[in-house]
Amino acid sequence: TVLSCGFDSVPLDLGVLFLQADALQRFGQPLQRVQGRVLRMRGGVSGGTAASLRGHALALGWPPSRALIGRLALPQPGLGPCWRLRETGSVNLRFTGQTAYGRSLAATVHGDRDPGHGRTARMLAKSALRRLQAHAGLRFSLVA
């Protein structure tokens, strides 16, 4: 079962990948520990994120959390914030990591638009196009 596949995981996974790639290039070794945190987030709650919260609460067996999440008026999957919140939202993340020998790296990730709908929709569409290009032998280009 996939519990998280949207904003709650994709930017975090990509932030770790970005930091690890830089560590290998700079230090010749991977980071042993990477921490990521949300510095700032603006926008609304998406139904997909709400479903991920419910899934995590069920998987981890946290009855108080399940009950609390169940009482909140969270949107259902596929639903989310209004157009204005999607367009004016943003997210800033920070990642820090350390090698086994104490060398450190830090990186930030910024996304415009609402993290749940505006950003995730673009990430999923770009990922799908990339896979399609790689597997179907097609090339896509924008025409201005």
Image (spheres, rainbow, N blue to C red):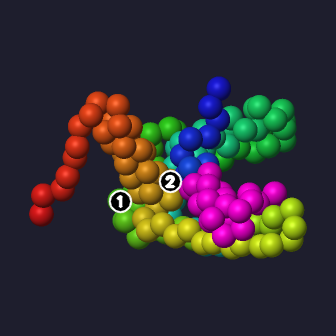
**Magenta region includes residue 128:** no
Type of the residue with mark 2: Gly
Picture disc at residue 116: 2
Label 2 secondary element:
helix
Query: Observer-nearest residue: 18 or 128?
Result: 18
Label 1 secondary element:
helix
Tell me which residue sits at (84%, 33%) in the image: 61
**Considering only vertical position in the picture, is 125 above or below 102?**
above
> Which residues make up the magenta segment?
11-33
Tell me which residue sits at (62%, 31%) in the image: 2
Precedes in sequence: disc 2 or disc 1: 1
**Which quadrant of the figure contains the N terminus?**
top right
Tell us which disc is closer to us: 2 or 1.
2
Query: Percent position (x, y) of residue 135?
Result: 35, 31
Helix, strand or loop for the magenta stretch, by majority: helix
Tell me which residue sits at (77%, 31%) in the image: 59
Q: How far is mark 2 from mark 1, CA to CA?
A: 12 Å
Picture disc at residue 105: none
Type of the residue with mark 1: Trp
Query: Percent position (x, y) of residue 25?
Result: 63, 65
The quadrant in which residue 130 appears is: top left
Query: Percent position (x, y) of residue 40?
Result: 61, 72
Picture disc at residue 83: 1
- Quick check: can you spot residue 1? yes
